[in-house]
Amino acid sequence: MKAAVCHGFNTPLKIEELDIAKPAEGEVRIKVACTAICHSDIHDMKGELPGPVPFVGGHETAGYVAELGPGVTGFKVGDRVVVSLLASCGTCYYCITGAPHLCQAKFGPPKRTRLSLKDGTPVAQRGSIGGFAEEVLVDQSQLVIIPDDMPLDRAALLACGVITGFGAVVNRTKPKAFESVVVMGVGGVGINALQGASYVGAYPVIAVDTLEAKLEASRQFGATHTVNTMDKDAADKIRQLTGGRGADYVYVTVGSIAAIKQGMGFTGPRGTTVLIGLPPVGQDLCFSPLEIIPTEKHLIGGFMGATNLPVDIPNLVAMYRSGKLKLDELISGRYSLDNIDQAIASTESGQALRNVIMFE
Ligand SMILES: [Zn+2]
Ligand SMILES: [Zn+2]
Protein backbone atom coordinates (compact mmCIF):
# COMPACT_ATOMS: atom_id res chain seq x y z
CA MET A 1 0.00 0.00 0.00
CA LYS A 2 1.05 3.58 -0.72
CA ALA A 3 2.13 5.96 2.07
CA ALA A 4 3.87 9.32 2.58
CA VAL A 5 7.04 8.41 4.48
CA CYS A 6 9.23 10.83 6.46
CA HIS A 7 12.83 9.60 6.13
CA GLY A 8 14.47 12.57 7.88
CA PHE A 9 13.40 15.72 9.74
CA ASN A 10 12.81 18.80 7.58
CA THR A 11 12.90 16.84 4.32
CA PRO A 12 10.03 16.36 1.83
CA LEU A 13 7.89 13.26 2.35
CA LYS A 14 8.45 10.35 -0.04
CA ILE A 15 5.40 8.64 -1.51
CA GLU A 16 6.23 4.94 -1.68
CA GLU A 17 4.89 1.39 -1.35
CA LEU A 18 5.02 -0.13 2.15
CA ASP A 19 4.22 -3.56 3.51
CA ILE A 20 1.59 -3.72 6.25
CA ALA A 21 1.36 -6.66 8.67
CA LYS A 22 -1.70 -8.86 9.25
CA PRO A 23 -3.78 -7.68 12.26
CA ALA A 24 -2.64 -9.28 15.53
CA GLU A 25 -4.80 -9.91 18.61
CA GLY A 26 -7.17 -6.95 19.12
CA GLU A 27 -6.00 -5.13 15.99
CA VAL A 28 -7.96 -3.94 12.98
CA ARG A 29 -6.75 -3.04 9.48
CA ILE A 30 -8.47 0.04 8.10
CA LYS A 31 -8.79 1.20 4.48
CA VAL A 32 -8.20 4.94 4.88
CA ALA A 33 -10.69 7.33 3.27
CA CYS A 34 -9.41 10.67 4.61
CA THR A 35 -6.70 11.98 6.93
CA ALA A 36 -6.55 15.64 7.97
CA ILE A 37 -3.30 17.46 8.69
CA CYS A 38 -2.76 18.61 12.28
CA HIS A 39 -0.03 20.97 13.52
CA SER A 40 1.43 18.09 15.54
CA ASP A 41 2.19 16.37 12.21
CA ILE A 42 4.33 19.36 11.27
CA HIS A 43 6.11 19.25 14.66
CA ASP A 44 6.79 15.54 14.01
CA MET A 45 8.29 16.25 10.59
CA LYS A 46 10.56 18.93 12.07
CA GLY A 47 11.80 16.64 14.84
CA GLU A 48 10.21 18.88 17.51
CA LEU A 49 8.37 15.98 19.12
CA PRO A 50 10.20 12.78 20.08
CA GLY A 51 10.08 9.73 17.80
CA PRO A 52 12.14 7.67 15.36
CA VAL A 53 12.46 7.93 11.57
CA PRO A 54 11.40 6.66 9.14
CA PHE A 55 7.75 7.17 10.07
CA VAL A 56 4.33 7.77 8.59
CA GLY A 57 2.47 10.73 10.14
CA GLY A 58 -1.23 11.53 10.22
CA HIS A 59 -3.58 10.93 13.15
CA GLU A 60 -6.92 12.49 12.12
CA THR A 61 -8.28 9.62 10.11
CA ALA A 62 -11.54 8.08 8.99
CA GLY A 63 -12.07 5.02 6.83
CA TYR A 64 -13.51 1.52 6.51
CA VAL A 65 -12.83 -1.63 8.49
CA ALA A 66 -10.95 -3.96 6.10
CA GLU A 67 -9.72 -6.88 8.25
CA LEU A 68 -10.23 -7.99 11.85
CA GLY A 69 -7.53 -9.55 14.03
CA PRO A 70 -8.28 -12.36 16.50
CA GLY A 71 -10.40 -11.33 19.49
CA VAL A 72 -11.85 -8.17 17.91
CA THR A 73 -15.51 -7.68 18.81
CA GLY A 74 -18.07 -5.07 17.87
CA PHE A 75 -16.77 -4.37 14.35
CA LYS A 76 -17.34 -5.97 10.96
CA VAL A 77 -15.68 -5.52 7.58
CA GLY A 78 -17.05 -2.43 5.84
CA ASP A 79 -17.93 -0.48 9.02
CA ARG A 80 -17.23 3.24 8.65
CA VAL A 81 -15.03 4.42 11.50
CA VAL A 82 -13.22 7.38 13.03
CA VAL A 83 -9.62 6.41 13.89
CA SER A 84 -8.10 8.24 16.87
CA LEU A 85 -4.68 8.03 18.52
CA LEU A 86 -6.41 7.36 21.88
CA ALA A 87 -5.84 3.67 22.57
CA SER A 88 -7.17 2.38 25.89
CA CYS A 89 -7.06 -0.94 27.73
CA GLY A 90 -10.48 -0.68 29.41
CA THR A 91 -9.21 -2.11 32.71
CA CYS A 92 -6.68 0.31 34.29
CA TYR A 93 -7.62 2.85 36.98
CA TYR A 94 -8.11 5.72 34.50
CA CYS A 95 -10.10 3.62 32.03
CA ILE A 96 -12.55 2.42 34.68
CA THR A 97 -12.93 5.88 36.25
CA GLY A 98 -13.96 7.60 33.01
CA ALA A 99 -10.64 9.02 31.83
CA PRO A 100 -9.51 6.50 29.18
CA HIS A 101 -7.48 9.24 27.45
CA LEU A 102 -5.03 8.84 30.36
CA CYS A 103 -4.88 5.02 29.99
CA GLN A 104 -1.78 3.65 31.67
CA ALA A 105 -1.37 0.58 29.45
CA LYS A 106 1.70 0.62 27.26
CA PHE A 107 0.43 0.37 23.70
CA GLY A 108 3.30 1.63 21.68
CA PRO A 109 5.62 1.28 20.05
CA PRO A 110 4.18 -2.16 19.21
CA LYS A 111 6.36 -5.14 19.99
CA ARG A 112 6.33 -6.13 16.33
CA THR A 113 6.70 -4.31 13.04
CA ARG A 114 3.38 -3.18 11.61
CA LEU A 115 4.82 -1.25 8.64
CA SER A 116 8.02 -1.78 6.66
CA LEU A 117 9.84 -0.50 3.60
CA LYS A 118 10.28 -2.90 0.68
CA ASP A 119 13.82 -3.68 1.98
CA GLY A 120 12.34 -4.73 5.34
CA THR A 121 13.27 -1.56 7.30
CA PRO A 122 10.61 -0.98 10.01
CA VAL A 123 8.54 2.20 9.66
CA ALA A 124 6.92 3.80 12.73
CA GLN A 125 3.27 4.90 12.84
CA ARG A 126 3.03 8.32 14.48
CA GLY A 127 0.15 8.60 16.90
CA SER A 128 -0.13 4.80 16.66
CA ILE A 129 -1.94 5.46 13.35
CA GLY A 130 0.20 6.66 10.43
CA GLY A 131 -2.82 7.92 8.52
CA PHE A 132 -0.98 9.43 5.55
CA ALA A 133 -1.31 6.00 3.99
CA GLU A 134 -3.86 3.95 2.09
CA GLU A 135 -4.15 1.56 5.03
CA VAL A 136 -3.51 1.63 8.77
CA LEU A 137 -3.29 -1.05 11.42
CA VAL A 138 -4.60 0.05 14.83
CA ASP A 139 -5.93 -1.23 18.16
CA GLN A 140 -9.70 -1.73 18.23
CA SER A 141 -10.02 0.77 21.11
CA GLN A 142 -8.93 3.54 18.70
CA LEU A 143 -12.06 3.08 16.57
CA VAL A 144 -15.60 4.41 16.78
CA ILE A 145 -18.28 3.40 14.25
CA ILE A 146 -20.10 6.33 12.63
CA PRO A 147 -23.42 6.39 10.76
CA ASP A 148 -23.62 5.88 6.98
CA ASP A 149 -24.71 9.47 6.33
CA MET A 150 -21.72 11.03 8.15
CA PRO A 151 -19.24 12.30 5.52
CA LEU A 152 -15.83 10.72 6.17
CA ASP A 153 -13.76 13.89 5.57
CA ARG A 154 -15.72 15.67 8.28
CA ALA A 155 -15.65 12.60 10.51
CA ALA A 156 -11.83 12.54 10.29
CA LEU A 157 -11.69 15.95 11.96
CA LEU A 158 -13.35 14.48 15.04
CA ALA A 159 -10.29 12.28 15.67
CA CYS A 160 -8.06 15.09 16.99
CA GLY A 161 -8.68 18.79 16.27
CA VAL A 162 -12.36 18.88 17.17
CA ILE A 163 -12.20 16.73 20.31
CA THR A 164 -9.04 18.46 21.54
CA GLY A 165 -10.57 21.95 21.39
CA PHE A 166 -14.23 21.20 22.13
CA GLY A 167 -13.37 18.66 24.83
CA ALA A 168 -10.87 20.96 26.59
CA VAL A 169 -13.84 23.20 27.34
CA VAL A 170 -16.75 20.79 27.67
CA ASN A 171 -15.00 17.82 29.36
CA ARG A 172 -11.84 19.11 31.00
CA THR A 173 -12.97 22.41 32.55
CA LYS A 174 -16.76 22.81 32.14
CA PRO A 175 -17.21 26.61 32.40
CA LYS A 176 -20.63 27.67 33.67
CA ALA A 177 -22.97 30.04 31.82
CA PHE A 178 -21.64 33.61 31.86
CA GLU A 179 -18.15 32.63 32.91
CA SER A 180 -15.61 34.31 30.65
CA VAL A 181 -13.44 32.44 28.16
CA VAL A 182 -10.37 33.41 26.17
CA VAL A 183 -9.16 31.11 23.39
CA MET A 184 -5.59 31.81 22.28
CA GLY A 185 -4.91 30.74 18.72
CA VAL A 186 -7.94 30.21 16.50
CA GLY A 187 -6.65 27.44 14.22
CA GLY A 188 -8.01 23.90 13.92
CA VAL A 189 -8.08 23.36 17.71
CA GLY A 190 -8.91 26.88 18.93
CA ILE A 191 -11.93 27.21 16.65
CA ASN A 192 -13.38 24.11 18.30
CA ALA A 193 -12.66 25.45 21.78
CA LEU A 194 -14.76 28.47 20.72
CA GLN A 195 -17.54 26.12 19.60
CA GLY A 196 -17.37 24.36 22.99
CA ALA A 197 -17.40 27.64 24.94
CA SER A 198 -20.37 28.88 22.97
CA TYR A 199 -22.17 25.55 23.49
CA VAL A 200 -21.86 25.66 27.32
CA GLY A 201 -23.08 29.27 27.47
CA ALA A 202 -19.83 30.99 28.44
CA TYR A 203 -19.80 34.77 27.96
CA PRO A 204 -17.89 36.64 26.74
CA VAL A 205 -16.06 34.21 24.43
CA ILE A 206 -12.95 36.08 23.34
CA ALA A 207 -10.88 34.85 20.39
CA VAL A 208 -7.22 35.87 20.48
CA ASP A 209 -4.82 35.58 17.54
CA THR A 210 -2.31 37.61 15.53
CA LEU A 211 -4.11 37.29 12.17
CA GLU A 212 -7.06 39.61 11.64
CA ALA A 213 -8.65 37.35 8.98
CA LYS A 214 -8.71 34.41 11.40
CA LEU A 215 -10.19 36.57 14.14
CA GLU A 216 -12.94 37.71 11.80
CA ALA A 217 -13.66 34.09 10.80
CA SER A 218 -13.75 33.03 14.48
CA ARG A 219 -17.03 34.92 15.00
CA GLN A 220 -18.99 32.30 13.03
CA PHE A 221 -17.67 29.64 15.47
CA GLY A 222 -18.92 31.39 18.60
CA ALA A 223 -16.46 34.19 19.41
CA THR A 224 -18.38 37.17 20.83
CA HIS A 225 -15.28 39.41 20.85
CA THR A 226 -11.83 39.32 19.27
CA VAL A 227 -8.47 40.68 20.41
CA ASN A 228 -5.32 40.86 18.28
CA THR A 229 -2.22 40.13 20.38
CA MET A 230 -0.17 42.29 18.04
CA ASP A 231 -1.92 45.21 19.81
CA LYS A 232 0.15 46.50 22.74
CA ASP A 233 -2.98 46.91 24.86
CA ALA A 234 -4.29 43.34 24.30
CA ALA A 235 -4.18 42.55 28.05
CA ASP A 236 -6.08 45.78 28.87
CA LYS A 237 -8.73 44.93 26.28
CA ILE A 238 -9.24 41.48 27.79
CA ARG A 239 -9.52 42.95 31.31
CA GLN A 240 -12.09 45.47 30.05
CA LEU A 241 -14.14 42.64 28.54
CA THR A 242 -14.00 40.60 31.76
CA GLY A 243 -15.12 43.11 34.39
CA GLY A 244 -11.55 44.27 35.05
CA ARG A 245 -10.56 40.86 36.45
CA GLY A 246 -9.18 38.79 33.61
CA ALA A 247 -10.82 35.67 32.20
CA ASP A 248 -12.21 32.74 34.18
CA TYR A 249 -10.76 30.30 31.61
CA VAL A 250 -7.93 30.79 29.13
CA TYR A 251 -7.25 27.99 26.63
CA VAL A 252 -3.79 28.20 25.07
CA THR A 253 -3.96 26.20 21.84
CA VAL A 254 -0.70 27.65 20.50
CA GLY A 255 2.39 25.52 21.18
CA SER A 256 4.55 28.41 22.35
CA ILE A 257 6.01 29.32 25.74
CA ALA A 258 5.47 33.03 25.02
CA ALA A 259 1.77 32.39 24.36
CA ILE A 260 1.43 30.38 27.60
CA LYS A 261 2.98 33.19 29.64
CA GLN A 262 0.74 35.71 27.94
CA GLY A 263 -2.27 33.46 28.59
CA MET A 264 -1.44 33.26 32.32
CA GLY A 265 -1.51 37.06 32.31
CA PHE A 266 -4.96 37.08 30.68
CA THR A 267 -6.31 34.79 33.45
CA GLY A 268 -8.11 36.41 36.39
CA PRO A 269 -7.85 35.51 40.10
CA ARG A 270 -9.15 31.96 40.72
CA GLY A 271 -9.15 31.59 36.94
CA THR A 272 -7.72 28.63 35.04
CA THR A 273 -5.12 28.61 32.29
CA VAL A 274 -5.41 25.42 30.23
CA LEU A 275 -2.34 24.33 28.25
CA ILE A 276 -3.32 22.49 25.07
CA GLY A 277 -0.84 23.28 22.24
CA LEU A 278 2.44 21.35 22.53
CA PRO A 279 5.59 23.51 22.61
CA PRO A 280 8.71 21.87 21.09
CA VAL A 281 10.46 19.39 23.39
CA GLY A 282 13.22 21.09 25.39
CA GLN A 283 11.46 24.44 25.81
CA ASP A 284 10.64 25.08 29.48
CA LEU A 285 8.05 27.33 31.08
CA CYS A 286 9.52 29.63 33.73
CA PHE A 287 7.41 31.87 35.99
CA SER A 288 7.35 33.25 39.51
CA PRO A 289 5.04 31.37 41.92
CA LEU A 290 4.04 34.86 43.09
CA GLU A 291 2.04 35.07 39.86
CA ILE A 292 -0.32 32.34 41.04
CA ILE A 293 -0.18 32.18 44.87
CA PRO A 294 -1.85 35.49 45.84
CA THR A 295 -4.30 35.18 42.92
CA GLU A 296 -5.09 31.48 43.47
CA LYS A 297 -4.83 30.86 39.74
CA HIS A 298 -4.90 27.35 38.31
CA LEU A 299 -2.52 26.13 35.63
CA ILE A 300 -3.57 22.79 34.13
CA GLY A 301 -2.96 20.57 31.13
CA GLY A 302 -5.66 19.54 28.69
CA PHE A 303 -4.89 16.39 26.69
CA MET A 304 -6.98 15.37 23.67
CA GLY A 305 -10.03 17.09 25.16
CA ALA A 306 -10.24 14.49 27.96
CA THR A 307 -12.13 12.45 25.40
CA ASN A 308 -13.94 9.20 26.03
CA LEU A 309 -14.23 8.09 22.38
CA PRO A 310 -17.31 5.81 22.49
CA VAL A 311 -19.27 8.51 24.39
CA ASP A 312 -18.01 11.73 22.83
CA ILE A 313 -17.71 10.85 19.11
CA PRO A 314 -21.40 9.81 18.75
CA ASN A 315 -22.42 12.98 20.66
CA LEU A 316 -20.38 15.15 18.28
CA VAL A 317 -21.79 13.36 15.24
CA ALA A 318 -25.31 14.01 16.57
CA MET A 319 -24.47 17.68 17.18
CA TYR A 320 -23.13 18.01 13.62
CA ARG A 321 -26.25 16.43 12.14
CA SER A 322 -28.46 18.81 14.13
CA GLY A 323 -26.47 21.84 12.96
CA LYS A 324 -25.05 22.67 16.40
CA LEU A 325 -21.43 21.75 15.55
CA LYS A 326 -19.77 23.29 12.51
CA LEU A 327 -17.49 20.87 10.64
CA ASP A 328 -18.06 21.73 6.94
CA GLU A 329 -16.57 25.18 7.55
CA LEU A 330 -13.40 23.71 9.09
CA ILE A 331 -12.14 22.16 5.84
CA SER A 332 -10.02 24.63 3.89
CA GLY A 333 -8.76 22.29 1.17
CA ARG A 334 -8.79 18.71 -0.10
CA TYR A 335 -5.62 17.15 -1.58
CA SER A 336 -4.47 13.83 -3.03
CA LEU A 337 -1.66 11.93 -1.27
CA ASP A 338 0.69 12.91 -4.11
CA ASN A 339 0.16 16.59 -3.22
CA ILE A 340 0.65 16.18 0.52
CA ASP A 341 3.68 18.52 0.68
CA GLN A 342 1.50 21.28 -0.79
CA ALA A 343 -1.22 20.58 1.78
CA ILE A 344 1.31 20.67 4.63
CA ALA A 345 2.85 23.95 3.41
CA SER A 346 -0.62 25.52 3.35
CA THR A 347 -1.31 24.30 6.91
CA GLU A 348 2.06 25.56 8.14
CA SER A 349 1.42 29.03 6.72
CA GLY A 350 -1.49 29.36 9.17
CA GLN A 351 -3.97 30.14 6.38
CA ALA A 352 -5.84 26.82 6.53
CA LEU A 353 -8.01 25.52 9.36
CA ARG A 354 -7.81 21.92 8.20
CA ASN A 355 -6.48 20.46 4.95
CA VAL A 356 -7.58 16.91 4.27
CA ILE A 357 -5.80 14.20 2.28
CA MET A 358 -8.44 12.30 0.32
CA PHE A 359 -7.89 8.64 -0.60
CA GLU A 360 -11.19 8.11 -2.43
ZN1 LIG B 1 -3.53 16.34 16.18
ZN1 LIG C 1 -6.43 1.74 30.49
Image: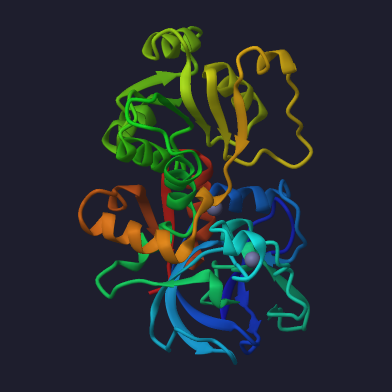
Q: Position of residue 214 (x, y in %)?
A: 38, 32
Q: Name the outermost residue toward the bottom.
A: 70
Ligand 2: image quarter: bottom right
Q: Residue at x 35, y 52 (%)?
A: 331
As rendered, which of 148 and 94 lies closer to the eye?
94
Please tell me whether residue 172 is drawn above or below residue 91 in the rendered image.
above
Depth order, front residue of 93/268:
93
Q: Position of residue 328 (x, y in %)?
A: 28, 53
Q: Residue 94 versus residue 341: which sits nearer the camera?
A: 94
Q: Is residue 314 left or right of residue 122?
A: left
Q: Residue at x 76, y 81 (%)?
A: 112
- Tell me the quadrant of the picture where the N terminus can be found: bottom right
Relative height, residue 39 to residue 218 (above, below): below
Q: Quadrant of residue 277?
A: top right
Total marks shown come to 0
Q: Position of residue 325 (x, y in %)?
A: 29, 49
User: Would residue 328 be visible to someone looking at this image?
Assistant: yes
